[in-house]
């Protein structure tokens, strides 16, 4: 009888000890088991849920990076819009006074704005140039500091110098041609962008896009030398970047002596005003389009994160334990195990004589 009781107590003690080891591991890790096979028959569902969660997590990282890029690009577009607006609404009106001192000051401002523009287009995020298309390792404007004195600026200045002889209409036409040039050594844009500009529109590289979901892409990229969603109109080269460069270069090339040729001078100022207006309008549309894309990406990310939370909850129901409940069971098991040890100890102390009393 004693041996039978001892055997039962030993078996129960071993069971309790195994259960306590399991509960201790679960309390420490929060997981039901470290082995997937122990989760049967929920293994197929757990694997499927983890695959979905992993895919959405990858999309989330891409969306976070893309949103960061659009926010940096938006800051550049906003500043470029301000430059176009300020020169159209504030700087140019002062030139109608035909004050040589005011002109010289505005020429300096125009050159400074050109340099700033070059750096704004060369903006980077996480080491990538954002207005370079897929050529993310090289700046779209190789020489921003030399933008105001480069070959395009020289060609524009040459055209502006003919104002008295050729007239404002001819000057505007020639500066437009100079600004539209993709000839190496004339264009201030990178070789990559020059090569792209030489292609037919259908053959040009598409805009950079974020894979928001399976088979779903949201385009957000903008090339420094061409419009993305905006359509330039009026006194324009067809590109807001080229328009802004062209008009700043033209303003920087004006000579105080040209103020005396009032009809041509005022006609040229009107053309510059319209050119700045065209750049401002296109930049406003570009910024608006990019803002809509950012909002869409953020909305997509919010919805995907809600789905990820749901998937994690479902995975937790399969793989994780309720910590409070597990701690309660652990304490109960420990108490039972201690009682079992005490019972075995007491039983071992029984002598035959005591047992027969």
Image (tube, grey):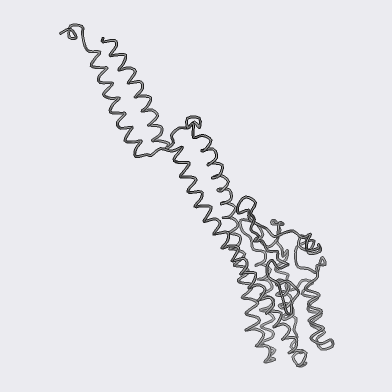
Q: Residue at x 81, y 87 (%)?
A: 167
Residue 146 position by quadrant: bottom right
Residue 157 position by quadrant: bottom right
Q: Is 192 displayed left or right of 82 in the figure?
A: right
**Label tally:** 0
Q: Residue at x 61, y 72 (%)?
A: 79
Q: Residue furthest right?
A: 165
Q: Is 112 displayed left or right of 182 in the figure?
A: left
**Where does residue 215 sit, x and y in percent of width and height?**
65, 51
**Where does residue 174 sit, x and y in percent of width and height?**
81, 79
Q: Is residue 39 above or below residue 169?
A: above
Quadrant where the C terminus lies?
Answer: top left
Residue 111 position by quadrant: bottom right
Q: Is 167 displayed left or right of 117 in the figure?
A: right
Q: Residue at x 45, y 41 (%)?
A: 316
Q: Residue furthest left?
A: 357
Quadrant where the N terminus lies?
Answer: top left
**Where does residue 74 sit, x and y in percent of width and height?**
60, 66
**Where does residue 137 sit, x and y in percent of width and height?**
69, 56
Q: Is residue 103 above or below residue 69?
A: below
Q: Residue at x 67, y 85 (%)?
A: 92
């Amino acid at each position: 009888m004693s041996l039978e009781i001892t055997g039962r107590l030993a078996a129960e003690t071993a069971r309790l000890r195994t259960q306590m080891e399991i509960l201790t591991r679960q309390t420490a890790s929060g997981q039901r088991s470290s082995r997937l096979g122990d989760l049967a028959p929920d293994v197929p569902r757990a694997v499927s849920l983890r695959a979905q969660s992993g895919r959405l997590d990858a999309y989330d990282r891409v969306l976070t990076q893309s949103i960061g890029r659009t926010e940096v690009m938006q800051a550049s577009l906003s500043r470029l819009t301000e430059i176009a607006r300020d020169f159209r609404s504030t700087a140019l009106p002062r030139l109608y006074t035909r004050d040589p001192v005011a002109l010289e000051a505005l020429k300096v401002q125009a050159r400074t704005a050109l340099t700033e523009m070059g750096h704004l287009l060369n903006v980077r995020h996480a080491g990538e140039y954002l207005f370079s298309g897929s050529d993310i390792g090289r700046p779209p404007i190789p020489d921003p500091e030399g933008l105001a004195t480069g070959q395009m600026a020289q060609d524009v200045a040459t055209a502006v110098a003919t104002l008295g002889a050729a007239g404002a209409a001819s000057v505007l036409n020639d500066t437009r041609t100079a600004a539209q040039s993709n000839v190496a050594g004339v264009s201030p844009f990178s070789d990559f962008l020059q090569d792209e500009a030489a292609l037919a529109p259908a053959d040009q590289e598409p805009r950079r896009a974020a894979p928001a979901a399976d088979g779903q892409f949201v385009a957000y990229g903008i090339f420094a030398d061409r419009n993305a969603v905006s359509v330039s109109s009026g006194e324009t080269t067809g590109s807001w970047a080229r328009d802004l460069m062209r008009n700043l270069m033209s303003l920087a090339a004006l000579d105080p002596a040209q103020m005396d040729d009032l009809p041509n001078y005022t006609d040229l100022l009107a053309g510059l005003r319209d050119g700045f207006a065209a750049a401002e309008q296109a930049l406003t549309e570009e910024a608006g389009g990019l803002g809509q894309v950012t909002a869409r990406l953020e909305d997509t990310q919010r919805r995907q994160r809600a789905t990820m939370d749901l998937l994690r909850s479902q995975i937790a129901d399969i793989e994780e334990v309720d910590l409070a409940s597990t701690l309660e069971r652990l304490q109960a098991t420990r108490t039972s195990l201690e009682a079992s040890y005490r019972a075995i100890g007491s039983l071992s102390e029984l002598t035959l004589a005591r047992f027969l009393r």
